[in-house]
Amino acid sequence: MVQIENLTKTFDSHTALRSLNLNIKKGSIYGLVGINGSGKTTAIKHLAGIYRQDSGTASIAGMPVYDNAELKARVGYIPDDLYFFPQYSMSGLRTFYANMYKTWNDKRYRQLLRMFKLDEKRRVSRFSKGMQKQAAFTFAMSVMPDVLLLDEPIDGLDPIVRKQVFQEIIEDVAEREMTVLISSHNLKEMDGICDAIGIIKDGRMLIERDLDELKSDVHKIQIAFNPQVVPDVSGLNVLHTEQRGSILLLVVRGSEDDVSRKIGEMNPLIYDRLPLTLEEIFIYETEGSKSDNDIPY
């Protein structure tokens, strides 16, 4: 449904995206994560039709996005750096959006206006940052998009409003098969709503997997051995290692059966698997193998 293939984008001497590939299934919620400067916003702006790629493609439903007004009318986009016409109130922007989008849903607009308790007559430019996010979400959802692109959508929102925003998104995904791309630093909340995750680093896609599959392929384990035994973990794909007294903590990549078999061959005295969060997976995958307490717990 939403696809980026071998996309490269350079600004002056800086290459922001390097042969980037991204694939989002129709009716799913995709989380794009990466450190600042990794290329998340640049990738999203290509899908929104704002940037023209140097090479490669950015497409929705098999059609290129750039310079395609008909296709972009089906896309809702909330950037991290919001901008509103200085003199426009919510009411004025409602008229603007209703004239611009054939799919405008006034009933949805009124519902979200009431939910967020926004003053329709007040200039949006005078709203707080959090209220501006709510206003942007109100307009983006009221055009009933087929694809929703969100760049740090919950930044500045309190927990109750964040829950309301995600609930509205989930309902549209379930009822209309809306496709959603979310870029966010809040990995804990993305962990709870995303179907798939893409981890981007230095303009390249590092990992792109269904979230459940990603979690089943990375494991945090603690093991202990007889003091006379020096464990050989060279047969494991180790992302992180840490010694805690007699306990050796490892984060490894691989199938659970394969990891268990290799650990079992070492005859450990203790072998436990520990819960692993999306935030931890992101840290280990982007930072590479770490040791000697480099990563705090």
Image: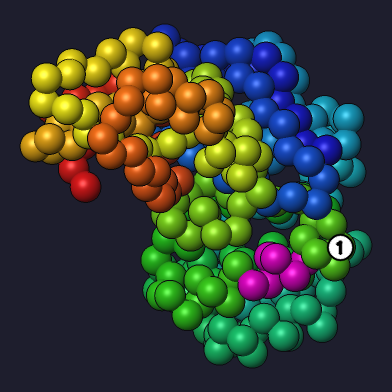
Q: 34 left or right of 23?
A: left
Could you tell me which residue is drawn at 29 percent across and 30 percent down?
268
Query: Magenta stretch: dominant SS?
Result: helix
Residue 67 at least partly seen: no
Q: With respect to residue 178, does 105 lie above or below?
A: below
Q: Say which quarter of the image contains residue 110.
A: bottom right
Q: Verify whether residue 107 appears in magenta.
A: no
Q: 33 left or right of 268?
A: right
Could you tell me which residue is drawn at 73 percent across and 38 percent down?
24
Could you tell me which residue is drawn at 40 percent across and 12 percent down?
235
| Residue nearer the viewer, 297 or 105 | 297
Q: Verify whether residue 171 appears in magenta.
A: yes
Could you tell me which residue is drawn at 78 percent across and 41 percent down?
25
Task: State the image coordinates of residue 101 (x, y, percent, origin top left).
Answer: 84, 60
Q: Say which quarter of the image contains residue 273.
A: top left
Callout 1 crowding tier (Cα within 10 Å): few <14, some 14–19, many ≥20: few
Q: 231 left or right of 41?
A: left
Task: State the image coordinates of residue 54 (x, y, percent, origin top left).
Answer: 64, 13
| Residue nearer the viewer, 20 or 58 | 20
| Residue nearer the viewer, 213 or 204 | 213
Residue topped by disc 1: 176
Image: magenta residue range:
167-172
Q: Say which quarter of the image contains residue 127.
A: bottom left
| Residue nearer the viewer, 119 or 259 | 259
- Secondary element type, mark 1: helix
Which amino acid does the dot numbered 1 rest on? Answer: Arg
Task: State the image coordinates of residue 257 (x, y, percent, origin top left).
Answer: 55, 30
